Amino acid sequence: MSMDLAYLLSRYQNALRSTSAAACVASRASHCALAAAYAERIRAYRIAQDMAEAA
């Protein structure tokens, strides 16, 4: 399933905001892991776009 980069960036930013606003360590860790997962998806999206442009 293809994702829009703007959507992924928005979700990443929301996860970062939630990380800094978290009330407890467990919640903070959960949001941080979610932000890291979105960062990885953004990286993969950019690599795929670069490969598509090079082809």
Image (cartoon, helix red, strand yellow):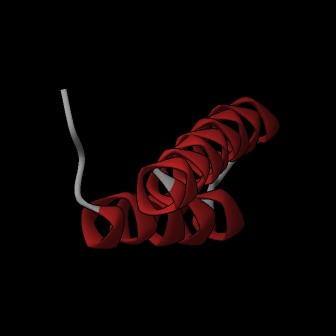
Q: In the depicted view, which residue is nearer to us: 19 or 38? A: 38
Question: On the picture, is 22 further left or further right than 26?
Answer: left
- The location of residue 50, given as percent across then percent down, is 55, 59
Q: In the depicted view, which residue is nearer to us: 44 or 51? A: 51
- Residue at 64 percent across and 32 percent down: it is 30
Q: In the depicted view, which residue is nearer to us: 22 or 54? A: 54
Q: Splitting the image into 4 quarters, where does residue 32 fall?
A: top right
- The location of residue 47, given as percent across then percent down, is 61, 50
Q: In the depicted view, which residue is nearer to us: 54 or 28? A: 54
- The location of residue 11, given as percent across then percent down, is 38, 59
- The location of residue 33, given as percent across then percent down, is 69, 34
- Residue at 53 percent across and 59 percent down: it is 54
Determine whether 46 is above or below 17 in the image.
above
Question: On the picture, is 39 further left or further right than 6?
Answer: right
- Residue at 64 percent across and 53 percent down: it is 23
Q: Splitting the image into 4 quarters, where does residue 49 fall?
A: bottom left
The total number of labels drawn is: 0
Question: On the picture, is 52 further left or further right than 25?
Answer: left
- Residue at 58 percent across and 41 percent down: it is 44
Q: Indicate the quadrant containing the N terminus: top left, top right, bottom left or bottom right.
A: top left
